[in-house]
Amino acid sequence: MNSAQGGSERPETSGRGNRISRTALHLVGATFLSALAGCSSSQGGPPPPPVGSAQLEEVPGQSPANVVEIQAVSAGPFNPSYWQSNTLNWVPDVRDPLFASQPGPNQNIYSPWALEQANGWRMFYGGWDGSDTPNDRVYSVTTPDFISFGNRILVIDHGAFQHVNNMNVHQLPDGSFHMICGVFPDALGLDKIAYFSSSDGITWNGATEPYSAQLSDMISIPNDPVYETTDYNGGNVLLRDNGIWDLFYSSGIFAANGVSRATTINPPTFEFVQTALSSSRYANDVRLFQSGGQNWYLMALYVEEITHIPPPTLTYSLSSDGIHFGPEQPLFGGAYAEDQYLTTPAFVTNGNQILGVLYGGNATDLLNPADQIFARWLQKRVILTDSSGVQHFAQGGYGPDRQWFLLPVGSSIEGDLIVYSEDGMTQIGSGKVTVNAGKPYRLVLN
């Protein structure tokens, strides 16, 4: 999805762009939304863990004076049975948004992609980011924990195109980077797909970043008879699987092609294989996980281009072979007034764990040029019950591994702790605790 919504019928300024950055912190109740199974297979993950003891150990540092912070609450290894069940414990980040545009005349960012690195993640994203002109470009920042961000740079400039955006990036064991992006326009005035590679994450397609995109960067799919004449305005995903590159590319509402799959050993030339999912949505992410010795493929999708009343919901689809994907199921909708029209979801992973989902969003509609980046974390469900029997629930997540509980300044809770896994239902620990507002604690399960 390009910010100015590529295609000859869409004017340059019809994309996403110029909202003042918001840094205010809003605390909302954690939402436990349904995510039904996206695959007909009944194969599940490992058996439920035994119920053990749960303790909270005070750790160095401070939290806000009216907050009890509990750390070590991120999701465990990928468990397909949780995705095949009716509950996943999605917790919105307390920051609204997680990451805002830089100051400047054109403020609009979305399409986040978190690439795992040795010391955290390099988060790529696209949009205008305070630029002087409303042209989509690709940027990146680094983060050790999704709490602090640094090294904010321009990676791919729009160059010969009006827009370059909707990237996803992979890094191979040899250190090389491989990026797929949407670009607009091609010779027919359509959105197409481009490929960029780098041996070190600094030099892209032979030039030091920011690389200026060229027409020659576009991919080809010679055996797909409709590729050249179809608009692919977002939702193009590259996946490395068993030494082969899989490309999932989506026509969305512009054609009835659904999500197609093509493969290659050497990009940028691909070979069409088959339709992976019949959908009018865009596949924005496909990840490969293992559980119980079996591969599982998880696809995240979004709706694009049209104004949705009521606001849209992100969806996902599950597959056990990476070739045929099951029916879409709801992932989640907006958590705040500012992210009701959400788009471009991408998973945050740590090895075989899904830590959460990053996405773009705004308050008005899908064509509003005012997106910022939000986060929803997949976390354990933690409940504190005080001595009078009042239950206290997380008010939100602070990064993928922390939850915040609101208490009056100077107050404390002495009572019971119950911990459930990230499905929100499977109890994995309990214990007696005493916690004080303004203090951080670490969850210890035995």
Image: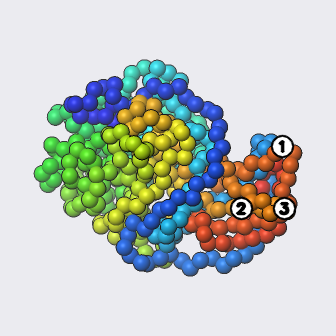
- Residue 107: x and y in percent read 47, 27
**In which quadrant is the C terminus drawn?**
bottom right
> Relative to residue 63, is residue 307 drawn left or right?
left
Q: Residues within 10 Å of mark 3 (few under 14, many from 20)?
A: few
Residue at image point 77% right, 50% down: 68
Distance from Cα at disc 3 to Cα at disc 1: 19 Å
Q: Residues within 10 Å of mark 1 (few under 14, many from 20)?
A: few
Amino acid type of disc 3?
Ser
- Disc 3 marks which residue? 388
Q: Residues within 10 Å of mark 2 (few under 14, many from 20)?
A: some
- Residue 150: x and y in percent read 59, 36
Q: How many numbered marks are there?
A: 3
**In which quadrant is the N terminus drawn?**
top left
> Relative to residue 332, is residue 241 drawn left or right?
left
Residue 410 or 238: which is nearer the viewer?
410
Q: Could you say whether the residue bearing mark 2 is in a helix, strand or loop?
A: strand
Residue 83 or 212: which is nearer the viewer?
83
Q: Which label belongs to residue 383? A: 2
Residue 237 or 367: which is nearer the viewer?
367
Instruction: Please identify, in this view, whether the residue under mark 3 or under mark 2 is nearer the observer.
Output: 3
Residue at image point 58% right, 54% down: 31
Q: Could you say whether the residue bearing mark 1 is in a helix, strand or loop?
A: loop
- Disc 1 marks which residue? 409
Amino acid type of disc 2?
Ile
